[in-house]
Image (cartoon, helix red, strand yellow):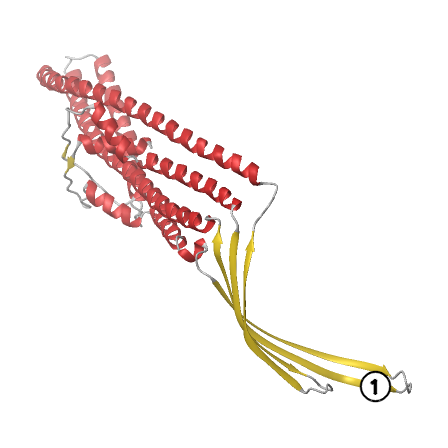
Amino acid sequence: MRKRLIYFMICLLGGGIATQAQYTYTLKQCLEEGLANNYSLRITRNEEQMSKNNATLGNAGYLPTVDLTAGYTGNADNSNTQARATGETTKLRGVYDQTLDAGVDLNWTIFDGFNISTTYKQLKELERQGATNTRIAIEDFIASLTAEYYNYIQQEIRLKNFRYAVSLSRERLRIVEERYHIGNFSRLDYQQATVDFNADRAQYIKQRELVHTSRINLNELMAAKDMDRPLSVKDSVIDVNENLEFNDLWEGALQTNASLLQADQNTVLAQLDYKKVLSRNYPYVRLNAGYGYTLNKYDVNATRQRNNWGFSGGVTIGFNIFDGNRKREKRNASLAIRNAQFARDELEQSLRADLSNLWQAYRNNLRLLELERQNLVSAKENHEIAKERL
């Protein structure tokens, strides 16, 4: 959620970046490539599609089920039969009777205490929640990639500054070394210039590592095949919006925040679970119908074979009087609704806190930006004075 707030603030602050390098990437191009290739987003989109596939009338139980069955049974029997009057025994060996049957059966729940309609509403709500989850994943991804993109620009700018600092230290060391040899500077001055030059070089080396790490992170977010491909960014210009209002930001967050929407959907799902428990207080009506065919073959019977075929059908009406768990499930479902509402309120409170922190950081950064502008003017003047002295 905090990542999405950061992205929200970045969009409001506004910014345009122009880059020219071996690989020219604007923020828009990075986002397009990342949204198309990122593996986590692919997984989330597939999960959204699964929720769409599940939201069908058949999955909810609205449609009947039709089964086709067929079977064959064979019996090989041996028997001895003794007549009571004569005492004569009749022996039969290897008597083989056969039964062949096939049929089509239809079963349809006509009414289930509104459980079917509630299940369908629940599946449709899960479908909407799948879309919300995808939106949250996309927003999180955009926030992460945008933050890393600007971080990469910042690290590149710092690297250029450290490179320039190294060039200044090298020039200063050259001047101090020459003046040391002619006796204008002491050996202490020469040693101090050497230490400063090495310190600037060490900072430059560390900064190169930070640039490399940021580039790897950016390529990873875009799911690039070559994690170490060059992405040079320069000549950045960021236009800062200094007229933001906290109340406008808060109202916008309440209306568009995807996490709040997801919390509302969780509340709806909890309410539907409660309705499913209540549906068990109603009777159910089930319809069954079928068409079957049966062939019987007898080895020694007076009837050689018999064929039966025809329709069958029936209606079942029932009512569950007691199942031992209904009251418990009803209480738990009611508590689940309250918990979902509490979770939504807690999320809104957390969102308010995050926005307040970001608002304070925004105002402080505006002040720091003005101070840095003043420092830049002073630094340029100090640089010119230092060059004249050297």
Determine the image quadrant of residue 354: top left
Query: In the visual, does 53 lie left or right of 23?
Result: right
> Where does residue 166 sit, x and y in percent of width and height?
20, 26
Q: Is residue 300 left or right of residue 366?
A: right
Task: Please state, as top left, top right, bottom left or bottom right, where the C terminus lies in the image.
Answer: top left
Q: Residue at x 38, y 45 (%)?
A: 125
Residue at x 17% of width, y 13% of height: 185
Left or right: residue 126 compared with residue 107: left
- Tell me where residue 11 sits by quadrant: top left
Category of crowding for the residue at label 1, using alpha-carbon neighbours closer than 10 angstroms: few (below 14), some (14–19), many (at least 20): few
Q: Where residue 365 appears, x then y in whole percent? A: 21, 21
Q: Is residue 53 above or below residue 12?
A: below
Circle 1 is placed at which residue position? 91
- Give, as a three-letter code, the residue at label 1: Lys
- Compared to residue 136, the image places residue 195 above or below, namely above
| Nearer-the-camera pick, 240 or 375 | 240
Q: Which quadrant of the figure contains the N terminus?
A: top left
Q: Position of residue 295 (x, y in %)?
A: 61, 81
In the image shown, does 374 or 287 lie closer to the viewer?
Answer: 287
Look at 25% across and 23% down and name the residue there.
359
Residue 155 seen from this side: no
| Residue 291 location (% of width, % of height) | 53, 73
Location of residue 70 with respect to 38 vertically, above or below:
below
Residue at x 22%, y 19% (from the top left corner): 364
- Which secondary structure lies at badge 1? strand
